[in-house]
Amino acid sequence: MNSASTTPRVETAPQTGSRLGRLDIARGFALIAMAIYHFGWDLEFFGYLVQGSASQGWWRIFARCIASSFLFLVGFSLVLAHSRAIRWRPFLKRLLQVVVAAAAITLLTWLFMPQGFIFFGILHQIALASLLGLLFLRMPVWLTIPLAALVIATPYYFRAEFFNHPALWWVGLSTVNPVSNDYVPLFPWFGAVLLGMAAARLMQATGLLRLLQGGIKPQWLEQGLIFIGRHSLIFYLVHQPILIGLMFAFASVFPPSPAIQAANFTNQCTVQCSEGSDPQLCRIYCGCMLENIESNQLTNLLKSSAATDEEREKLNNFSAQCIAKAQEGQLISE
């Protein structure tokens, strides 16, 4: 999962008239965490980490925590900005900015990564959640919290083929999750927004909003995080192109190790092969392909799918040999 925030900015705390600096700091921390995760994703994309590293284990948990924190802040900020009355002009202005940014992300990823383009990522969710959140501004906290729990739990207990149509993927209740580099559907993620709204209402009612005033030490860290938190949309839009540019320059001078390239090739080959064949047979086949590629000094094909006509002919010959070897191995095991 790629995750970012464009939470509505709160200029003043409604009760005190003073800026809630620690809310901006929290937003800044979340954005830095997002950049760290995306850096890990870029390391995988450029071949410095084994494929799948950024979507498994602790990296996966890290990504989900980041997305949850952003959406929690969306709900929290929505209440603070509009709890007395909906300020339509700033709300619609900010919503338009998010929608345009989300559309740009969809277009760019569709052009450059069509197989996993972002059709409903974090920005799309923030835009939808901002609109839906207005419906729950006056809902009592005792009702908002169980509703949030219901939204979060629903996709774990209810899915239907009706939602498998691409036009309904944004709901998040399809029986198979679609392929996307950043998929943040309504269910379960709107639940985090509702929890943020409930938390803001509770802090308003108990006077705890004052805890969000002030800053942190050291001052240079506070100033940096506040600056990032107050310019969240810009940070989201520019940080990944900058990271990719830096990674491209680094990879040109220090390419990834052959061992990781070989592991990535084997993993990708095995996954693709296993979609229609026996996994054990696929492991034999892919190991054979890797051995042939390395022994014939075609390791350039491990990091790029581009091949000359001569190289493609060699790959076809390797494939025929490796299919025979895999089938022979299967017969022996039987």
Image (spheres, rainbow, N blue to C red):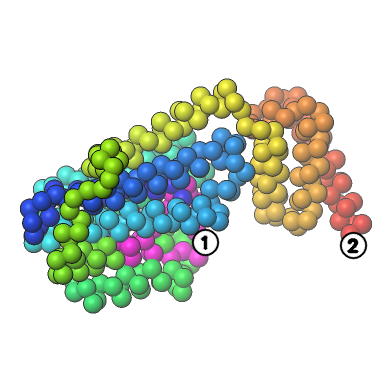
Q: Nearer the viewer, residue 183 or 12?
A: 12
Furthest toward the right, the residue is 332
Report whether residue 168 is seen.
no
Location of residue 76 in the rendering, given as x and y in whole percent from the top left corner: 23, 59
Q: Residue at x 41, y 57 (%)?
A: 65
Q: Which mark is residue 325?
A: none
Range of magenta residues = 173-193
Q: Quadrant of residue 263?
A: top right
Q: Residue at x 54, y 38 (%)?
A: 43
Q: Nearer the viewer, residue 207 or 285?
A: 207
139 with respect to 274 (left or right)? left
Location of residue 18 in the rendering, given as x and y in whole percent from the top left corner: 10, 51
CA gap between label 1 and label 2 equals 34 Å
Furthest toward the top, the residue is 253
Q: Amino acid at mark 2?
A: Glu
Q: Is residue 22 above or below residue 227?
A: below
Labels 1 and 2: the sequence-earlier one: 1
Report whether residue 295 is seen.
yes
Q: Residue at x 17, y 53 (%)?
A: 213
141 with respect to 43 (left or right)? left
Q: Is residue 61 above or below residue 314?
A: below
Q: Nearer the viewer, residue 44 or 288?
A: 44
User: Magenta includes 178?
Assistant: yes
Which residue bears the numbered disc 2? 334
Magenta stretch secondary structure, dominant: loop
Q: Residue at x 46, y 45 (%)?
A: 37
User: Magenta includes 170?
Assistant: no
Location of residue 300 in the rendering, given as x and y in whole percent from the top left corner: 69, 28
Query: SS at mark 2?
Result: loop
Which residue bears the numbered disc 1? 176
172 with respect to 265 (left or right)? left
